[in-house]
Amino acid sequence: NVKFINQGAFENCAINGTLNLNNVVAIADYAFAGNAGIKAVNLPATLQSLGAYCFGNNKALKSVSIKAEKIKLGEYAFSDCSSLEAISINAAVIPAGAFNQCTSLTDVTLGRDVSVVSEYAFRGTAIAKFKLDSANTTFYSKDNGEYLTNKAGNELVLIAPGVSGSFSVTDGSITSIGNAAFSGNLRITSVNIPSVTRVGAYAFAYCQNLSTITLGTLT
């Protein structure tokens, strides 16, 4: 019946197996960070917030179930959870590094209220296509989820980290690349979007294999 789990409460412990946190409301920063044996986490409908790095570096964590309709998610909350395979998340902001280096992560559903995806949120993951809740009114899925645009279709908001090689949009529809849109993509080698006139903050940050970029005249 614990409702609040404080900062670092179980950091670097030896908790094993499935963690059922019934009735919890908030989990603070680093609360369960560094637990090598946690394999599954079940979070209830009462949950409101997950703190920064709260489940960070849980190498065996494979499954996370979040029953809450909407939560606030902290930076790097699930960073370095290298066994995590799937997540369905509804938070207004997916913050910096939220799923950074979750190298097994391939299946992601972004909920109806997601409106911002920050830098390096999915860096190092294997996501080839994003799933988007049909009730989401902020984003529009393109190429079956390979990338997301704003509803107007003129700003590229997010590209799946698993997209590799050359990426091109030449129909003139994209005039802006949003903040952090490509950030942390380690597989892409070239980008060709000649209609782009604006590039947001962190747009191509740490795209370490990106060598060729063709854009329009930036304003």
Image: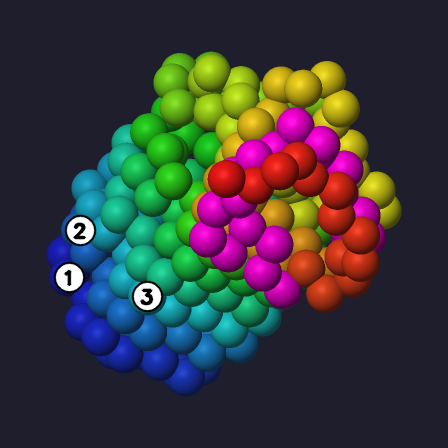
Dots 1, 3 in contact, CB < 8 A: no
The x, y position of residue 144, in whole percent, is 69, 22
Q: Which mark is residue 52?
A: 3
Residue found at the far right of this picture: 165
Judging from the image, what secondary structure is the residue with disc 1 in? strand
Asked if 72 appears above or below 148 in the picture, the reply is below
* Precedes in sequence: disc 2 or disc 1: 1
Query: How dense is the environment of label 2, judged by Cα within 10 Å: few (below 14), some, or many (20 and up)?
Result: many
Type of the residue with mark 3:
Ala
Q: Which residues are drawn in magenta? A: 187-206
Taking depth in this image into account, of 68 and 183 the one nearest to the observer is 183
Q: Is residue 78 magenta?
A: no
Q: Is residue 189 magenta?
A: yes
Taking depth in this image into account, of 181 and 92 the one nearest to the observer is 181
- Circle 1 is placed at which residue position? 4
- Circle 2 is placed at which residue position? 25
Asked if 140 appears above or below 85 in the picture, the reply is above
The x, y position of residue 79, in whole percent, is 50, 65
The x, y position of residue 38, in whole percent, is 49, 67
Type of the residue with mark 2:
Val
Q: Is residue 64 visible?
A: no
Nearer to us of marks 2 and 3 is 3
Q: Is residue 211 visible?
A: yes
Q: What is the CA distance from the residue labelled 2 to the residue labelled 1?
A: 6 Å
Judging from the image, what secondary structure is the residue with disc 3 in? loop
Q: Which mark is residue 133?
A: none
Dots 2, 1 in contact, CB < 8 A: yes
Which residue corresponds to the image point at 28% horizontal and 70% vertical from the top-left? Answer: 29
The x, y position of residue 54, in whole percent, is 35, 67
Judging from the image, what secondary structure is the residue with disc 2 in? loop
